[in-house]
Amino acid sequence: MARVRRALHPSPVSVALRRTASDAGLHVVTAVLLALAVALAVVVPAGVEDAADRAVAAAAAAPASDPTSDPTSDPERAAVVLEVPLGESAADLGVTADTLDGAVAAQARAVGQAVPGVLGEPVAALSVARLGTVLARGEQGLTSLRLVHPVRPAADGGEPQVVWTAGGPAGPPPPSGDDGGGLSLAVGLAEPVATALGVGPGDRLPAVLGGTGGSALDVVVSGLFTPADADDPAWRTAPGLLAPRTTGSGPTAATDVAALVDDAQVPALVALPAALPVLTTALPVRPAALRATSAATTARALAALEAAPPAQLPGVSGAPARLRTDLDDLLRDAASQVAAARARSVVLLASLLAATAALVVLASSLLVARRSRALGVLRTRGAPLTATAVEAAVEAAAVALVAVLVGLALATPVTGSPLTGSAAPGPAPGPALVLLLVPLLVLAVAAPALLSALAAAAVDGTARPTGPVHPGDRRARALALDAAVVLLAVLALTALVTSGTGGPPSTGPLAAAALPLGALAAALVGRRLLLPLLPPLRTRAARRGGAVALVAASRLEAAARRTPVLVALVLTTSGAATAVLLAAAHRAAPASGTAAPAQAAAAVLALELRHLAVLVAAALAVLGALAVVLDAVATEPQRRTEAAATAVLGTPRAAVRSLAVAELVPLAAAGAALGVLTGAALAAVAAGPLGLGAVGRPAAAAWALVPAAAVVTCSVLTAVLASRRTPAVSGRSVP
């Protein structure tokens, strides 16, 4: 008896498994759609985050807009520069080269603790500012001399090495000037500097300390050198030390040169009256260590350091340092561009997932239509609607589960494990995966369950209201539903437009859904505008066109009433057009005076947007073509029946075959045209809030038509193939 009961009342799971096997083709289509959606929802955010990291790194590595404007600026963007004036009492502190090494190490530790892992090894220099030199004014203009002692802690490689080509390093401090009361200091000169000044070992360069009226200083050239490694970062804190730096031309020409002060001369340099030596430490940024996710935090930490630099420098003077950096502004600008890039990716991905949802509904409708007879039989035998819905939900959930696992497996080689967040070339997407996929997966399970229950209920009239319903009431409800969708689309677009007000754009759930909701509203409004035009066409066909024209007009009107198909076509073609137009509208907008870094970041993000746009547009074109195919398969039985009836009347076979073309191609063309227009309008609305320029470039407009053209072409091919299956009068396929 138990076996009999199990045979008469099988479990929902066993029923679902049998049905899944019998309709494997449609389940494969649904599973592929969901798997690709899952994979893209994982890969795209991870790819955007990877591009964001590269954009921040590119901005940090970009050269300053004018590195020659500041003699201590680093052409490779020193992230942090600290300046410590030693003051008049520096000579009494017994400052030596070792003291300076310890001070620089202390500075590096203090800054490194605030922004760990971001900055590289420190390079520093103790320097006396430009000294007036008594040199003839030539093509190089007025020449200013700086006295520089490069400093780098031994733990970071020590001081840069030189090769003496003439003379040598200074020994004990030289005697004072001829008048017995002057000051002198022995220095080394790089060969290009010595050539520019026309001096050699033993020559003296007269200079003045403390500006006009200050103490005279004889700078004695002890030797000439070349750097052992001209690319050593330690030389970057001493512009003019390895070669003269001339700015301007003609009367405005000015040249900066620097002389090398070795370890033995540091006490003498500090002891020079009115020299006011300054210890300048540069901590270069490590671009590869920067992350977009922490850019804002790092910028705030740097701003705090700038407002309150390290208070004490043990062993030097105890004076507070002056800290300057533009890395905080750079990171804020980059973070703003990255936020816009994230918003663009979310919006485009939402369009792709919305189109996927429309295709899932189409596939579910086709699946339920194939089972309508079986569902009716079960209903007449007393099967409850809840059991029918549960069976369909179990079946759909099994397909969705397999699709999710396949999608995650496809994404894992690119992003690592999305479930564990393990690092593999790109970061795991985190919450974006859940926020983007949950509605789609819920729909994939709920749509078959709801449609199956409605199909079963239609057999015994359960789905129909008990009382009379006026046609006007139905139209009013349908109009109210369309109006609600339009209102929701307006609210979503408003949320998107206002999302970037006063800061970088952000995409909450409503703003993220703005583009697909706008396309959905356009599809519903377009359908309402299209339907009144078709009855007159059918009437004219009945009067003048014969049986084939009448049937074709009727089929076209029926096609226009298939809302899910039109919605799918508009969603796919609109999303593709929007993606292409937004990618073409990308611009590099300099901000906060950091033009080159902003442009470097924008270039990386623009390339990523183009790649994403191509991916989304291509995927949406495929989905649009699939929508045409699914619609053709779903309507084939009715089309075959009407074509057979038309053929009985003696209609030529060629005319009978044209029915599929008349039904499928105009619908695809209308949906594609409406989609392109909608996509262009939505791109124009969304470009500004998403940090892009104006849309409407002719080349971009031409490319925006390509996905729609592909969908229409697919409809033509599908219609031709469908027409070959049209039956002849005998019931055989027309050859």
Image (tube, rainbow, N blue to C red):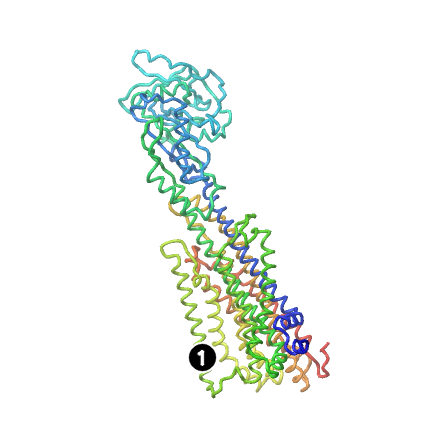
Asked if 156 appears above or below 727 in the picture, the reply is above
Residue 225, image x and y in percent?
47, 21
- Can you say which quadrant of the picture contains the N terminus? bottom right
* 606 relative to 627 in the view: left or right: left
Outermost residue on the bottom side: it is 468
Asked if 437 appears above or below 601 in the picture, the reply is below
Q: Let me know if residue 13 appears in the view.
A: yes
- Asked which quadrant contains residue 259, the reply is top left
Which residue is at 38% across, 39% downward?
325
- Asked which quadrant contains residue 200, the reply is top left
Residue 726, image x and y in percent?
68, 78
Asked if 71 appears above or below 381 in the picture, the reply is above
Q: Residues within 10 Å of mark 1 (few under 14, many from 20)?
A: few
Residue 84, image x and y in percent?
34, 30
- Asked which quadrant contains residue 656, the reply is bottom right
Asked if 366 appears above or below 432 in the picture, the reply is below
Q: Let me know if residue 245 appears in the view.
A: no
Residue 5, image x and y in percent?
65, 78
Hey, what amino acid is under mark 1?
Arg
- Can you say which quadrant of the picture contains the C terminus? bottom right
What residue did someone put label 1 on? Answer: 477
Which residue is at 41% across, 34% downward?
109
Outermost residue on the left side: it is 213
The secondary element bearing badge 1 is classed as helix
